Every structure is written in structure tokens, then in C-alpha cells.
Image (spheres, rainbow, N blue to C red):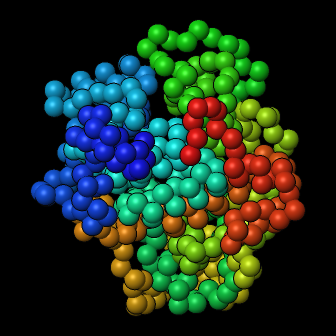
């Protein structure tokens, strides 16, 4: 239900006024009356169950289409938390500030748009959306409704960045001060510390199975195409199917690529050329791939080396120097040099404070959409098995209708954004 429908129903006097979200009534500048925000988690399987508690927010609702998952979450959280099987009922509650979306990715775009329209702030798991078109819709809805959005990958602002042995901040400082020269090539492979998880591949020729009694499979599919139930399609192994995610690239891509986008100062744009080297892909099941190269207009490149072909590759290579795994470099005293350089602009990294103060979070709908676009560009190139040209402004492929059809994929009726 969008804002207009909420208000219209209230005016008509059909008893819905008491569930108009507080954010809608209070306007975009609404701040919670207490220091403790309230939240709901939609999707309480493996990932969602790990986010039932975090500082600054009190859980009041959980939602899942699997009764087993739902009951497990309720057993953990206690009697003050209410359970739902339809996320739309959660969005109608006026006492919820934050909605945490921890479903499979084929639901992320639809739920995030609906949450923004219902006046909720949003914490969304990665990848942000399954398609580029859905990402554009999320950006529009969040900004139109004045919501605060957080994408749940955090390496651009905290923790050691995989094989680099350091947080991203010192790397950002080195690149921002042109230590390695320009343009740069970034290689993401096993040798530089990144595992592409090709175990997240699908099974071909799945046989139909009986749907478990505790799973609402039709609602689990939601906007995805109607296909016979198989246990391997759902829950943990859903990542191996194009309809729901994109294998290891979909699972790990935004963790790996969002910090690279930040390091290269590309939060506002996207590559213009994508090349792919991959076996022919099955139309349903995601397979492996060998190499994807993405090139920006200024010549910077991101290399996704799936088969670890470049065993001696630097993580960052420029005309003036290289940075290798473990923060090693051919430039002397690289750690001391990084420490001496000015810090990048500060970021808002406390989501609860961002919500209370109506501040843009460090990884938000706009830059999150751009880094998710990197993931989706790679998925489309691998899936089609050919090189692509992309316009970062229109966010469409140039001269390739088949690729553009994968930007805005139809949703199964009655679901739509």
C-alpha cells in the first residue's frame, strides 16, 4: 500500500487511520520520540535470524513464509514480538520505524519500495536488488519518500577488507592522493584474497517435489516465475538460480565490489564496457565463469578473475606502483605513507543515529545501487556470454535489446513495482 492509498482509506473512514505509519503523519523530518527505535525483520532464515538484535533498535515483529523459520524466531525473541507471514501486514503497523529485509534477493526491490511508500526506514541485505531496473525503483522510492536506507555490507567503512589485511580507509587515502598513478586496474581473485564461491551454482533438470506443509511456496516465489517446487530452489541454495540471485557473484559480489567502487571514487557512475569469458549458461541454473572485465570511461578497470588466472596479480596496479594482498607494495614504507595522508571525508556509519537525525548513511540507496549495478552487469554479461556496452547515465545497454530485457525483468502477477 502506498501513501496515497493509506490516506485515501483514512478519509473514506474505513477504519485504517490507526495504522497510518508515524512517518507519514509526521512528514519526512520525523524523529522517534525516544532513543530506542523499533524494527521488524522480514525473512528470518539463516541471515535474518542473525539480525534479530542490534544496538539502538527494539524488535517488535518478525515475518517469514516458512512457519518453521517463523516459529524459531519467535521462540528466540519472546512474547513481545509478533509473527507474520505476509510482509504487507508488517508495513501497516504504525509503531515500526525500521524494516530489515533479509529475504532472498528477488524480493529485495519490491519490499524496499513498499517499505519506503509505507514510511519505513530500511536496512536491506546484499545484493541490494536482483536487477538494475529494480535498483533504480528503490532509489526513486527511498528519495521520494525521504527515507533512510542502509545496505548491509560494511567493508567500505569498517573491518579488514578480505585478503588486504587492512580496512579500506588506508587504501582509499593512497588512491585519492594518486600514489599509484592513474588509471588503475583492480584484480579480484583468489590470489588477491577473494573467493568467488562457485559452490553457489544451481542444479540442472530439477525434479518436482512435494511442497513442505510449513512453507508457503507461492508466496516464497512472489514476483519470481512460477516453477515447480524443489528443495534446492529455496532457502540456502536459492543463490544457484537466476530467478532469485546470481551464484557466487550475486552472493559475494557486493561485499567485494562496493569497497572498490568507493576506493576508485565511482559512487556516481558505472563502467561503459563489460567483457565476459564464461561457459554457456543454463537458462535456469547459474554456472561458473572464468573472467569478467569492467572498464570505466577514464580507463580504470575492475577484473573479476574467477579461475585465478593471474596468480601474481596486484590488488591495485597503476603506472606508478602496485598494492598486493596483505597490504604489501612495491612502494617503500607504504603503511607509513598511508598513515601520513589526510583522511577521507567522514561517513555516517551508525544506522540508528542516521535514522534519528535523518542523515544519509555511508552505504545508502544511491551508492549501493551503483555497486549492485556492478554485480548485475557481471551477471548479465556471464548469462548472455558476450561483451556489452553500457551507458552510465541512462543505465541501459547500447545496441543490445536482449541485455536491456534483463534490466527490467517482468514480475509474476499480481506483483509489481
Residue at horizontal 32 percent and vertical 40 percent from the top: 12
Residue 298 position, x and y percent, is 72, 82
- Estimate the x, y position of residue 328 in percent, counting from the top left: 54, 75
**Is residue 122 rendered to the left or right of residue 373?**
left
Q: Quadrant of the N terminus?
A: top left
The residue depicted at 68 percent of the width and 23 percent of the height is 227
Q: How many marks?
A: 0
Q: Nearer the viewer, residue 312 or 359?
A: 359
Position of residue 105 measured from the top left corner of the image (x, y, whole percent)? 55, 42
Q: What residue is drawn where x is 38% and y is 26%?
A: 85
Is residue 238 visible to the viewer in this orientation of the structure?
Answer: no
The image quarter in which residue 358 lies: bottom left
Q: Is residue 170 above or below residue 95?
A: below
In front of the other: 190 or 148: 148
Q: In the displayed structure, does residue 144 sit left or right of residue 243?
A: left
Q: Evaluate whether residue 388 shows in this view.
A: yes
Question: Which x, y percent locates residue 66?
Answer: 43, 22
- Identity of the residue drawn at 38% across and 19% down: 67
- Residue lying farthest front? 12
Q: Residue furthest left?
A: 34
For residue 238, above or below residue 161: above
Amino acid at each position: 500500500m502506498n501513501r496515497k492509498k493509506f490516506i485515501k482509506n483514512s478519509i473514506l473512514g474505513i477504519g485504517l487511520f490507526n495504522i497510518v505509519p508515524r512517518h507519514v503523519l509526521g512528514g519526512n523530518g520525523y524523529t522517534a520520540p525516544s532513543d530506542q527505535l523499533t524494527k521488524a525483520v522480514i525473512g528470518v532464515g539463516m541471515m535474518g535470524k542473525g539480525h534479530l538484535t542490534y544496538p539502538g533498535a527494539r524488535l517488535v515483529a518478525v515475518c517469514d513464509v516458512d512457519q518453521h523459520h517463523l516459529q524459531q524466531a519467535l521462540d528466540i525473541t519472546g512474547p513481545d514480538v509478533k509473527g507474520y507471514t505476509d510482509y504487507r501486514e508488517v508495513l501497516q503497523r504504525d509503531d515500526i520505524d525500521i524494516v530489515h529485509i533479509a529475504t532472498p534477493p528477488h524480493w529485495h526491490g519490491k519490499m524496499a519500495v513498499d517499505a519506503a511508500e509505507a514510511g519505513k526506514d530500511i536496512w536491506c541485505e546484499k545484493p541490494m536488488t536482483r536487477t538494475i531496473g529494480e535498483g533504480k525503483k528503490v532509489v526513486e522510492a527511498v528519495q521520494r519518500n525521504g527515507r533512510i536506507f542502509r545496505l548491509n555490507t560494511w567493508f567500505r567503512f569498517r573491518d579488514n577488507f578480505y585478503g588486504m589485511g587492512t580496512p579500506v580507509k588506508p587504501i582509499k587515502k593512497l588512491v585519492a592522493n594518486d600514489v599509484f598513478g592513474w588509471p588503475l586496474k583492480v584484480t579480484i581473485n583468489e590470489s588477491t584474497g577473494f573467493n568467488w564461491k562457485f559452490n553457489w551454482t544451481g542444479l540442472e533438470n530439477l525434479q518436482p517435489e512435494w511442497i513442505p506443509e510449513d512453507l508457503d511456496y507461492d508466496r516464497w516465489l512472489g514476483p519470481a516465475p512460477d516453477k515447480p517446487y524443489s528443495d534446492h530452489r529455496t532457502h540456502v541454495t536459492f543463490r544457484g538460480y537466476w530467478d532469485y540471485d546470481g551464484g557466487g557473484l550475486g552472493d559475494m559480489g557486493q561485499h567485494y565490489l562496493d569497497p572498490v567502487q568507493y576506493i576508485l571514487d565511482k559512487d556516481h557512475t558505472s563502467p561503459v564496457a563489460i567483457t565476459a569469458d564464461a561457459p554457456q549458461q543454463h537458462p535456469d541454473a547459474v554456472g561458473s565463469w572464468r573472467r569478467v572485465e569492467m572498464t570505466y570511461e577514464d580507463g580504470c578497470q575492475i577484473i573479476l578473475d574467477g579461475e585465478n588466472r593471474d596468480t601474481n596479480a596486484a590488488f591495485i596496479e597503476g603506472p606508478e606502483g602496485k598494492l598486493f594482498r596483505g597490504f604489501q607494495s612495491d612502494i617503500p614504507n607504504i603503511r607509513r605513507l598511508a598513515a601520513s595522508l589526510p583522511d577521507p571525508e567522514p561517513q555516517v556509519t551508525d544506522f540508528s543515529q542516521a535514522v534519528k537525525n535523518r542523515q544519509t548513511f555511508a552505504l545508502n540507496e544511491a551508492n549501493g545501487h551503483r555497486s549492485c549495478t556492478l554485480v548485475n552487469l557481471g551477471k548479465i554479461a556471464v548469462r548472455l556470454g558476450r561483451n556489452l556496452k553500457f551507458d552510465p547515465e541512462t543505465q541501459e545497454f547500447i545496441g543490445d535489446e536482449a541485455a536491456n530485457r534483463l534490466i527490467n525483468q517482468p514480475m509474476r502477477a499480481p506483483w509489481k513495482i
